[in-house]
Amino acid sequence: MNRPGRPPAAPTVAGLLWLALAAAAPAQAPAALPPGASIGIDEHLGDRLPLDLEFRRHDGAACRLGDFFGGDRPVLLTLNYSNCPQLCSEQLRGLVESLRAIDRDPSRDFRLLTVSIDPAETPEQAAASRARYLADYGRPGADWDFLTGAEEAIAALAEAVGFRYSFVPTTGEYAHVACAFLLTPDGRVARYLYGVRYDPRTLELSLAETAAGELRSTADKILLYCFQYDPSKGGYTLAVLNLVKVFGLLVVVVLGGFLLRLFRQERRTRENAAA
């Protein structure tokens, strides 16, 4: 611990490397996995979720997965569990930080859904987790539901989005990776966001792109045209050709308006001269 008045010690190269590895690592080391088990992500872009799966909300009410879809709002899904020793809390805290940095309302523009991968988790545990992250978010009225369910329903949802996880009997924990899933309003997989920290620009543009076939503002349309999603980088990159097209169109519009104005002035001059 640093003493009062003394600046904190600079992190060492080894310390930074350890932190980077910890952020990217799964919740449990692969060496501890049971034989034949694996963890990771298999992208299922465009696949539709089984919306008839049954779960329980954080308030104990029975629900179907399809209850959270429909309308024109995309759904941001995470698969976590309350007793996760570190990775889940890091991911959800990182998600909250990114959500606070974007100008989108989770009660109007999108929905948040966190499903526990632990079938032993209770709605009471889910409610406690929800209250904690909503308090961090600062929006207690946000549409963020935490669900628990039977092992079969959890496994079916995980398979639908390509989320491979495994229970480790020696530790009593679940080995998994950190990933958020963007789903269309009708329940199709639209985007994968990897890691425990999410670039706010990537998150905001992804939400706009995933909305039901329409972008919510002119700014969204311009940004989504000028920025393209790069799966190899897990984010949006500037599309130079598209940007050139946008500026070219602006030049044509401005030049056309300028020439039209000159033509009208010349016509008025001739009419005045004739009069």
Image (cartoon, rainbow, N blue to C red):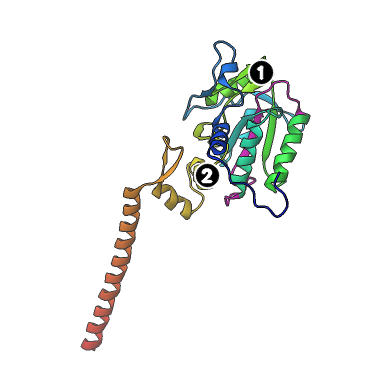
Mark identifier at residue 199: 2
**Neighbour tally class for label 2: few under 14, some 14-19, many 20 plus, Cα within 10 Å:** some
Nearer the observer, 41 or 111 = 41
Q: Is residue 167 above or below residue 66?
A: above
User: Of helix, strand and loop, which one carries label 2?
Assistant: loop
45 relative position to 118: left or right: left
Image coordinates for residue 260, horizontal then vertical, percent: 28, 71
Residue shown at 64%/17% (left/top)? Answer: 168
Nearer the observer, 240 or 77 = 240
Q: Based on the displayed image, in which of its 4 quarters is residue 81 positioned?
A: top right
Nearer the observer, 241 or 169 = 169
**Quick one: quadrant of the C terminus?**
bottom left
Q: Is residue 270 visible?
A: yes
Mark identifier at residue 151: 1
- Type of secondary structure dominating the magenta stretch: loop
Residue shown at 63%/43% (left/top)? Answer: 96
Nearer the observer, 13 or 20 = 13
Region of the chain picked out in magenta, as a range: 101-123
Q: Is residue 141 visible?
A: no
75 relative position to 245: left or right: right
Q: Earlier in the sequence, mark 2 or mark 1?
A: 1
Image coordinates for residue 257, horizontal then vertical, percent: 31, 68
**Quick one: quadrant of the N terminus?**
top right
User: Of helix, strand and loop, which one carries label 1?
Assistant: helix
Between the residue at mark 2 and the residue at mark 1, the CA separation in whole angstroms equals: 32 Å
Image coordinates for residue 16, horizontal then vertical, percent: 55, 39
